[in-house]
Amino acid sequence: MKRLHDQIEEFPKEDVRSAIHRGISQAEKQRNDDIMQPKINKKRRKVLYTLGSVAAVFMILVGSSYYSPALASSLSQIPIIGSVFGNSDLIGLQQAQENGLTNKVGETQTVDGISVTLDEVLYTPSKITVGLIIETEKELEEHYFGAGMDITINGKLPKGSSGSYGEEIQSDTVITAIQEISVSEEMPDAFDLGLILHGENGEKWYFTTPIEKITDVQQIPLDHSQTVDGVELTVKELSLSEAGGSISFESLEDGTDFALSKGKYIEFKLVDQNGNEITSYSGGGSGEIRGDKLFYQSSKDFDPIDNSVTELTITPYLALPSGGGSVEIDENGESRELELNFDVLQPVEFESIKVEIPQ
Amino acid sequence: MKHDIKTVKKAINGDKSAFEKLLIQEEKMLYYKALSYVRTKEDALDVIQETACKAFLAISQLKNPEYFSTWLFKILIRECYSLLKSRDRIIPYEENELLKKLDREQDEEIESFHLSEALSRLRSSYQTCLILFYYHDLSIKDIAEVMEKPSGTIKTYLRRAKKTLKSELERSYKLNEKTS
């Protein structure tokens, strides 16, 4: 094969380099032109995982709402929606709203014909949930607001934050949205929460509101550690309130590649003493490489439990997706798709933890 | 070519200048490899441009940074193949080189004169397989990727290609004997 080019004229260095350069520019252009690719606001999200096919993923709200033109025309006549939380399907949010645990805000800001109302905020030990009502003059494209809002804590940008954002289309011109922000160590029990929503055309809506963590929370320390199939899992705490419950946990495993991490797939099945399952919700978490280990921490939420529950059996498991992948976003905002390796990602049988609920 | 793993990782994370640096390190290989397939300078440059574009769009999916070169050249070969296919052209080869390799597989020596004729009678997919396998030394897996066919199909193509080539060669020998 070499002989083919031995006698060929000199290597056209400049031409080859400009072909390489043109190719890269072409790729950049294609990437920018790709309207199917939602513009994700990646700033300041340290490591965010969005899992594809886990049961009851909160992100499922995006695009899953049914759109009926007939209903839309009647809904558009309704000037305002009662409460974003009250109208949501999430029992915890409904109860929190009914029991007055939320911070009602009701502030509206209008930029270029798009009115965004910060309806209410709920601050629980595991997350901050924000309800928004967005009213527009004309229909907006899908993913107009990207992956939701950026936040500030007492006017300062946090080191990192993770969460999820979902929209429900109420009519051609009314959207309700719920943003969840995972609580980090940087967040005091009460602080001024700043919320910045970015529109696709560069619009910016900025709200600040004082928020306070709900106090009526029962915290049950568990500190249960187990190591199974190379995953060291520590279930740290169970917290219960009228707004729902959450389980905080950490995982540690060998390796430096998040694509192979099992920790990010950990979910929990909760069953009460009568065998009734409590609906739990998956969500994001954050991970980091510590030496030659992968560390991952998160908390998973579940619906509120009533007084009849005296005991909970918590069974950790891996909610392995059947397809798709995750996205890793580093501190510089660069994203990378993580391909799934099903040779490594095998189910893990963790032992269950029984917890008595103090009455 | 061994690349600096750090630079490859940077490129995987979307660093444009790191990616460009890697391609420039491979520029000669890219050019001559492309030229060996498409033959003209203009086509080789087109292939390099397409390769740079496709590779930059896909690099985030590269799992093993140490295989950057292998991965890049697979894209390049695929681009060469699709360019040739769009022009209904067969992958060029040097007869003597191909002969040497084919001879090792055949019972009797093949004469250069008969080879090109016999090869040209094969279906283009058979020709491509033979040339990629024997002349360009591509593995079955790589040929499957280039031709976008399952490995099993490539194995079948190769087996049938060899069988057909053999009978075509025998036919042309006989014809030759009769005429001489």
Image: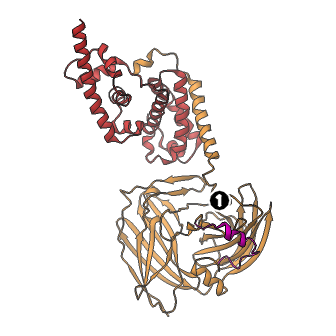
Chain colours: A orange, B red
The reply to whether residue A315 is visible in this rendering is yes
Left or right of A113? Residue A235 is: left
Furthest-front residue in this view: A70
Per the image, label 1 sits on a secondary structure element best described as loop
Closest to the observer: B108 or A344?
B108
Give the residue displayed 20% in from the left and 19% down from the top.
B108
Closest to the observer: A112 or A193?
A112
Chain under callout 1 = A
Furthest-top residue in this view: B180
- Amino acid type, callout 1: His
Give the residue displayed 65% in from the left and 65% down from the top.
A158
Please tell me whether residue A36 belongs to the stretch shown in magenta. no
Give the residue displayed 55% in from the left and 81% down from the top.
A244
Quadrant containing the N terminus of chain A in the rendered view: top left
Where residue A243 appears, as percent x and y from the top left, is 59, 82
Closest to the observer: A241 or B15?
A241
Q: From the image, tell me which residue sits under label 1.
A: A143
Where residue A12 appears, as percent x and y from the top left, is 55, 21
The reply to whether residue A256 is visible in this rendering is no
Magenta-colored span: A64-85
Closest to the observer: A271 or A330?
A271
Give the residue displayed 54% in from the left and 66% down from the top.
A284
Left or right of A188? Residue B176 is: left
Where residue B89 appears, as percent x and y from the top left, is 45, 25
Q: Quadrant of residue A75?
A: bottom right
